[in-house]
Protein backbone atom coordinates (compact mmCIF):
# COMPACT_ATOMS: atom_id res chain seq x y z
CA UNK A 1 0.00 0.00 0.00
CA UNK A 2 1.62 3.31 -1.02
CA UNK A 3 2.52 5.68 1.80
CA UNK A 4 0.10 8.59 2.13
CA UNK A 5 -2.87 6.64 0.75
CA UNK A 6 -5.71 5.77 3.12
CA UNK A 7 -7.26 2.74 1.46
CA UNK A 8 -10.81 1.76 2.31
CA UNK A 9 -13.01 -1.24 1.57
CA UNK A 10 -11.37 -4.38 0.24
CA UNK A 11 -8.32 -2.39 -0.97
CA UNK A 12 -7.39 -1.99 2.69
CA UNK A 13 -7.07 -5.75 3.20
CA UNK A 14 -3.52 -6.50 2.10
CA UNK A 15 -3.19 -9.89 0.42
CA UNK A 16 -1.69 -12.67 2.52
CA UNK A 17 1.76 -13.95 1.61
CA UNK A 18 0.95 -17.42 2.99
CA UNK A 19 -1.87 -19.39 4.55
CA UNK A 20 -2.07 -21.83 7.45
CA UNK A 21 -2.96 -25.17 5.92
CA UNK A 22 -3.44 -28.26 8.15
CA UNK A 23 -0.79 -27.20 10.63
CA UNK A 24 1.74 -26.02 8.03
CA UNK A 25 2.47 -22.63 6.48
CA UNK A 26 1.97 -22.70 2.73
CA UNK A 27 3.92 -19.87 1.08
CA UNK A 28 2.14 -18.11 -1.77
CA UNK A 29 5.29 -16.42 -3.08
CA UNK A 30 8.76 -17.91 -3.60
CA UNK A 31 11.88 -16.58 -1.89
CA UNK A 32 10.27 -15.68 1.44
CA UNK A 33 11.23 -18.69 3.54
CA UNK A 34 13.59 -16.67 5.78
CA UNK A 35 11.22 -13.77 6.40
CA UNK A 36 9.73 -12.73 9.77
CA UNK A 37 6.37 -14.52 9.85
CA UNK A 38 3.26 -12.92 11.39
CA UNK A 39 0.11 -15.06 11.45
CA UNK A 40 -3.46 -13.92 12.07
CA UNK A 41 -6.92 -13.25 10.62
CA UNK A 42 -6.95 -9.48 11.12
CA UNK A 43 -6.30 -6.93 8.32
CA UNK A 44 -3.91 -5.32 10.81
CA UNK A 45 -1.46 -8.15 9.98
CA UNK A 46 -1.35 -7.53 6.24
CA UNK A 47 -1.18 -3.78 6.76
CA UNK A 48 1.75 -4.08 9.18
CA UNK A 49 3.62 -6.47 6.88
CA UNK A 50 3.17 -4.16 3.89
CA UNK A 51 4.37 -1.09 5.79
CA UNK A 52 7.37 -2.91 7.27
CA UNK A 53 8.39 -4.25 3.86
CA UNK A 54 8.29 -0.68 2.57
CA UNK A 55 10.73 0.17 5.37
CA UNK A 56 13.15 -2.58 4.35
CA UNK A 57 12.12 -5.49 6.56
CA UNK A 58 11.37 -8.97 5.17
CA UNK A 59 8.01 -9.68 6.77
CA UNK A 60 5.43 -12.25 5.64
CA UNK A 61 1.72 -12.01 6.48
CA UNK A 62 0.06 -15.40 6.93
CA UNK A 63 -3.71 -15.80 7.02
CA UNK A 64 -5.01 -18.03 9.81
CA UNK A 65 -7.34 -18.03 12.80
CA UNK A 66 -6.29 -16.97 16.29
CA UNK A 67 -6.08 -20.62 17.32
CA UNK A 68 -3.86 -21.40 14.34
CA UNK A 69 -1.72 -18.35 15.09
CA UNK A 70 -1.10 -19.40 18.70
CA UNK A 71 -0.38 -22.97 17.63
CA UNK A 72 2.11 -21.84 14.99
CA UNK A 73 3.88 -19.49 17.43
CA UNK A 74 4.20 -22.19 20.08
CA UNK A 75 5.45 -24.72 17.51
CA UNK A 76 8.08 -22.31 16.15
CA UNK A 77 6.43 -22.02 12.72
CA UNK A 78 5.72 -18.32 13.18
CA UNK A 79 7.55 -15.46 14.87
CA UNK A 80 4.40 -13.53 15.80
CA UNK A 81 0.70 -14.24 16.31
CA UNK A 82 -2.19 -11.80 16.00
CA UNK A 83 -5.16 -12.93 18.12
CA UNK A 84 -8.56 -11.68 19.20
CA UNK A 85 -11.04 -12.55 21.89
CA UNK A 86 -13.09 -11.13 24.77
CA UNK A 87 -11.05 -8.98 27.15
CA UNK A 88 -11.35 -11.53 29.97
CA UNK A 89 -10.20 -14.46 27.80
CA UNK A 90 -7.82 -13.01 25.26
CA UNK A 91 -5.73 -15.88 23.83
CA UNK A 92 -2.07 -15.89 24.82
CA UNK A 93 0.73 -18.38 24.10
CA UNK A 94 1.82 -20.85 26.74
CA UNK A 95 5.47 -20.08 25.95
CA UNK A 96 7.13 -16.83 26.99
CA UNK A 97 6.19 -13.97 24.68
CA UNK A 98 5.96 -10.20 24.52
CA UNK A 99 2.62 -8.70 23.60
CA UNK A 100 1.14 -5.45 22.31
CA UNK A 101 -2.44 -4.25 22.14
CA UNK A 102 -3.89 -3.41 18.72
CA UNK A 103 -7.32 -2.10 19.71
CA UNK A 104 -10.73 -3.77 19.50
CA UNK A 105 -13.58 -4.55 17.12
CA UNK A 106 -16.93 -6.30 17.10
CA UNK A 107 -17.71 -9.85 16.08
CA UNK A 108 -21.18 -10.04 14.61
CA UNK A 109 -23.47 -11.03 11.76
CA UNK A 110 -23.19 -9.49 8.31
CA UNK A 111 -26.47 -9.60 6.41
CA UNK A 112 -27.06 -9.66 2.65
CA UNK A 113 -26.95 -6.10 1.30
CA UNK A 114 -30.64 -6.17 0.36
CA UNK A 115 -31.58 -7.06 3.93
CA UNK A 116 -31.92 -5.10 7.14
CA UNK A 117 -29.54 -5.97 10.01
CA UNK A 118 -30.20 -9.52 11.17
CA UNK A 119 -31.65 -10.16 14.61
CA UNK A 120 -29.91 -12.95 16.49
CA UNK A 121 -33.35 -14.39 17.20
CA UNK A 122 -33.90 -14.91 13.45
CA UNK A 123 -30.76 -17.04 13.27
CA UNK A 124 -31.75 -18.92 16.42
CA UNK A 125 -35.21 -19.68 14.98
CA UNK A 126 -33.80 -20.71 11.59
CA UNK A 127 -35.54 -17.86 9.77
CA UNK A 128 -32.20 -16.72 8.32
CA UNK A 129 -29.60 -19.13 6.88
CA UNK A 130 -26.28 -18.98 8.68
CA UNK A 131 -22.79 -18.82 7.19
CA UNK A 132 -20.79 -20.20 10.09
CA UNK A 133 -17.08 -20.27 10.81
CA UNK A 134 -14.89 -23.24 11.66
CA UNK A 135 -15.64 -24.66 15.10
CA UNK A 136 -12.22 -23.71 16.49
CA UNK A 137 -12.47 -20.00 15.65
CA UNK A 138 -13.09 -17.43 18.36
CA UNK A 139 -15.67 -15.69 16.17
CA UNK A 140 -17.75 -18.86 16.03
CA UNK A 141 -17.42 -19.21 19.80
CA UNK A 142 -18.84 -15.69 20.15
CA UNK A 143 -21.94 -16.66 18.18
CA UNK A 144 -22.39 -19.82 20.22
CA UNK A 145 -22.18 -17.85 23.49
CA UNK A 146 -24.76 -15.36 22.21
CA UNK A 147 -27.14 -18.12 21.15
CA UNK A 148 -26.65 -19.91 24.48
CA UNK A 149 -27.89 -16.78 26.24
CA UNK A 150 -31.08 -17.22 24.22
CA UNK A 151 -31.27 -20.86 25.27
CA UNK A 152 -30.33 -22.13 21.81
CA UNK A 153 -27.53 -24.54 20.93
CA UNK A 154 -26.14 -24.41 17.40
CA UNK A 155 -26.26 -27.52 15.24
CA UNK A 156 -22.61 -28.33 14.61
CA UNK A 157 -23.28 -29.86 11.20
CA UNK A 158 -24.53 -28.56 7.89
CA UNK A 159 -24.61 -25.12 6.37
CA UNK A 160 -21.91 -23.06 4.73
CA UNK A 161 -18.56 -22.71 6.51
CA UNK A 162 -16.52 -19.63 5.59
CA UNK A 163 -12.73 -19.69 5.50
CA UNK A 164 -12.26 -16.31 7.17
CA UNK A 165 -13.73 -12.87 7.84
CA UNK A 166 -13.60 -11.71 4.22
CA UNK A 167 -14.88 -15.03 2.88
CA UNK A 168 -17.78 -14.85 5.34
CA UNK A 169 -18.67 -11.33 4.24
CA UNK A 170 -18.41 -12.41 0.61
CA UNK A 171 -20.94 -15.19 1.24
CA UNK A 172 -23.30 -12.70 2.88
CA UNK A 173 -22.92 -10.30 -0.05
CA UNK A 174 -23.83 -13.16 -2.40
CA UNK A 175 -27.06 -13.69 -0.46
CA UNK A 176 -26.12 -16.98 1.19
CA UNK A 177 -27.31 -15.86 4.62
CA UNK A 178 -26.11 -14.06 7.72
CA UNK A 179 -22.36 -14.53 8.12
CA UNK A 180 -20.21 -14.59 11.26
CA UNK A 181 -17.50 -12.00 10.69
CA UNK A 182 -15.90 -8.80 11.99
CA UNK A 183 -16.91 -5.18 11.59
CA UNK A 184 -14.24 -4.28 9.03
CA UNK A 185 -15.12 -7.17 6.70
CA UNK A 186 -18.80 -6.24 6.71
CA UNK A 187 -17.88 -2.62 6.05
CA UNK A 188 -15.66 -3.64 3.12
CA UNK A 189 -18.75 -5.04 1.38
CA UNK A 190 -21.08 -2.29 2.70
CA UNK A 191 -23.23 -4.92 4.44
CA UNK A 192 -25.69 -4.41 7.31
CA UNK A 193 -24.03 -5.59 10.51
CA UNK A 194 -25.35 -6.78 13.86
CA UNK A 195 -22.67 -6.69 16.59
CA UNK A 196 -22.57 -9.64 18.98
CA UNK A 197 -19.44 -9.36 21.10
CA UNK A 198 -16.52 -6.96 21.45
CA UNK A 199 -13.10 -8.53 20.96
CA UNK A 200 -9.74 -7.15 22.00
CA UNK A 201 -6.90 -7.64 19.51
CA UNK A 202 -3.31 -8.38 20.47
CA UNK A 203 -0.04 -9.26 18.80
CA UNK A 204 2.33 -11.74 20.46
CA UNK A 205 6.00 -12.23 19.55
CA UNK A 206 7.92 -15.22 20.87
CA UNK A 207 10.47 -14.14 23.48
CA UNK A 208 13.27 -15.79 21.50
CA UNK A 209 12.53 -13.40 18.63
CA UNK A 210 12.26 -10.23 20.71
CA UNK A 211 15.66 -8.96 19.54
CA UNK A 212 14.92 -9.64 15.86
CA UNK A 213 15.15 -6.35 13.89
CA UNK A 214 11.69 -6.95 12.40
CA UNK A 215 10.21 -7.58 15.87
CA UNK A 216 11.59 -4.28 17.16
CA UNK A 217 10.37 -2.51 14.03
CA UNK A 218 6.94 -4.09 14.45
CA UNK A 219 6.64 -2.82 18.03
CA UNK A 220 7.61 0.67 16.90
CA UNK A 221 5.17 0.55 13.98
CA UNK A 222 2.15 -0.30 16.13
CA UNK A 223 2.57 2.92 18.10
CA UNK A 224 3.15 4.99 14.95
CA UNK A 225 0.33 7.29 13.86
CA UNK A 226 1.18 6.42 10.25
CA UNK A 227 -0.01 2.89 11.07
CA UNK A 228 -2.99 3.62 13.30
CA UNK A 229 -4.41 6.21 10.90
CA UNK A 230 -4.40 3.63 8.11
CA UNK A 231 -5.93 1.04 10.42
CA UNK A 232 -8.65 3.54 11.33
CA UNK A 233 -9.33 4.10 7.62
CA UNK A 234 -10.21 0.41 7.22
CA UNK A 235 -13.10 1.01 9.61
CA UNK A 236 -14.58 -0.83 12.55
CA UNK A 237 -11.65 -0.43 14.96
CA UNK A 238 -12.02 1.03 18.45
CA UNK A 239 -9.51 1.81 21.21
CA UNK A 240 -6.76 2.56 18.69
CA UNK A 241 -5.16 4.96 21.18
CA UNK A 242 -4.00 1.79 22.98
CA UNK A 243 -2.36 0.37 19.87
CA UNK A 244 1.28 -0.48 20.58
CA UNK A 245 0.98 -0.48 24.37
CA UNK A 246 2.41 -3.57 26.05
CA UNK A 247 0.37 -6.35 27.62
Image: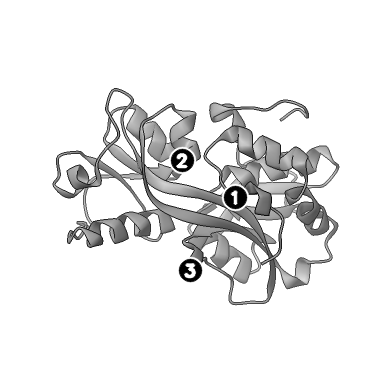
| Numbered disc 3: secondary structure | helix
- In the rendered structure, which disc, 1 or 2, sits on the residue that comes first in sequence? 2
| Numbered disc 1: secondary structure | loop
Q: Which residue is drawn at 42% across and 49% down?
A: 107
Q: Is residue 60 above or below residue 186?
A: below
Q: Position of residue 180 (x, y in %)?
A: 36, 45
Q: Dividing the picture into quarters, in which one does residue 245 lie?
A: bottom right
Q: Do the residues labelled 2 and 3 touch (CB within 8 Å)?
A: no
Q: Is residue 112 above or below residue 163?
A: above
Q: Which residue lies furthest to the bottom in this view?
A: 95
Front tag of 1 and 2: 1
Between 116 and 12, the one nearer to me in the picture: 116
Q: Which residue is drawn at 46% across and 40% down?
A: 183
165 on left or right of 95: left
Instruction: State the CA–CA distance, disc 2 to disc 3.
Output: 20 Å
Q: Residue at x 59, y 71 (%)?
A: 93
Front tag of 3 and 1: 1
Q: Position of residue 203 (x, y in %)?
A: 64, 59
The residue where tag 1 is placed is 239
Q: In this view, does 150 lie above or below 130?
A: below
15 on left or right of 171: right
Instruction: State the CA–CA distance, disc 1 to disc 2.
Output: 14 Å
Q: Where is residue 157 in the image (x, y as percent from the top left)?
A: 22, 54
Crowding at dot 2, Cα within 10 Å, few <14 / some 14-19 / many 20+, comes out as: many
| Colour pattern | one colour
Instruction: State the CA–CA distance, disc 3 to disc 1.
Output: 16 Å
Crowding at dot 3, Cα within 10 Å, few <14 / some 14-19 / many 20+, comes out as: few
The residue where tag 3 is placed is 88
| Numbered disc 2: secondary structure | helix
Crowding at dot 1, Cα within 10 Å, few <14 / some 14-19 / many 20+, comes out as: few
The residue where tag 2 is placed is 183
Q: Can residue 17 be seen in this view?
A: no
Amino acid sequence: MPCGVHATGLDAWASADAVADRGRLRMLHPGEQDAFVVLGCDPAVGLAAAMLRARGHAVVAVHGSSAQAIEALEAGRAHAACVHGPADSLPRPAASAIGWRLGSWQVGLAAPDDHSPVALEDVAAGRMPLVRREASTFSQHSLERALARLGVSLDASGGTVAAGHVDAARHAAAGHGAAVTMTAAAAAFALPFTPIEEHQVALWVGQQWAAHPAARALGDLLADRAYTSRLAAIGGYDQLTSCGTTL
